[in-house]
């Protein structure tokens, strides 16, 4: 019997999931991505750090005033190497924001480049500041 501090190396048996793989899945944690948020008179822009995330492993959702980002990163293994043991797990990212009614969530623009997700949400026309002309009498 192995002590808890030892690493058990187990092989798959005809596609069955090993006890070690189940334990690793339970230990997987959700990370909160770091973000920068800038708001101006016309929009709010959010940059979220999502290293190793590809477009197909990214979900951005807006519902009932909440904006949710969920993503899974991929740890690439070169094709000429066989992975026997790893202690680096592909992180899962999740973060939710409350979006003010001043912003039009039906017009969110999203782009992903070099592990950085950029979201832009325009301000509703009626919420934009406007100049009031003052008449002289």
Image (spheres, rainbow, N blue to C red):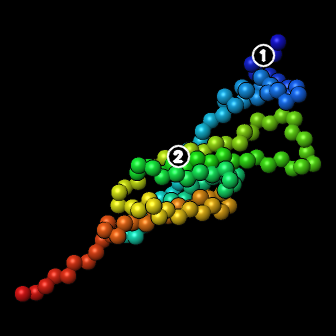
Q: Residue at x 54, y 59 (%)?
A: 47
Instruction: Calculate the distance from the C-alpha at mark 1 to the C-alpha at mark 2.
Output: 36 Å
Tell me if 69 is positioned left or right of 27 in this view: left
Label 1 secondary element: loop
**Front residue of 11 and 61:** 61
Tell me if 135 is positioned left or right of 22 in this view: left
Mark 1 lies on residue: 3
Looking at the picture, how far across and down is residue 56, in whole percent?
Answer: 68, 53
Quarter in which the N terminus is drawn? top right
Q: Residues within 10 Å of mark 2 (few under 14, many from 20)?
A: some
- Which badge, 1 or 2, is on the more N-terminal residue? 1
Q: Residue at x 69, y 47 (%)?
A: 73
53 w.r.t. 123: above or below = above
The label shown at residue 95 is 2
Tell me if 80 is positioned left or right of 57 in this view: right
Looking at the picture, how far across and down is residue 133, in whole percent?
Answer: 20, 82
Q: Residue furthest left?
A: 137
Looking at the picture, how far across and down is residue 38, in whole percent?
Answer: 45, 63
Residue 38 shows up from this direction: no
């Amino acid at each position: 019997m192995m002590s808890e501090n030892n690493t058990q190396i187990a092989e798959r048996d005809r596609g069955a999931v090993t006890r070690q793989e189940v334990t690793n899945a339970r230990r997987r944690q959700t990370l909160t991505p770091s973000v920068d948020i800038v708001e101006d008179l016309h929009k709010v822009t959010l940059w979220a750090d999502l290293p190793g995330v590809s477009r197909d492993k990214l979900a951005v959702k807006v519902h009932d005033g909440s904006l949710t980002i969920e993503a899974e990163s991929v740890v690439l293994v070169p094709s000429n190497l066989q992975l026997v043991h790893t202690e680096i797990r592909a992180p899962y990212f999740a973060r939710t924001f409350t979006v003010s009614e001043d912003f039009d969530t039906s017009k969110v623009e999203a782009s992903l480049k070099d592990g950085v997700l950029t979201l832009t949400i325009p301000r509703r026309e009626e919420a934009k500041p406007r100049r009031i002309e003052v008449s002289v009498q």
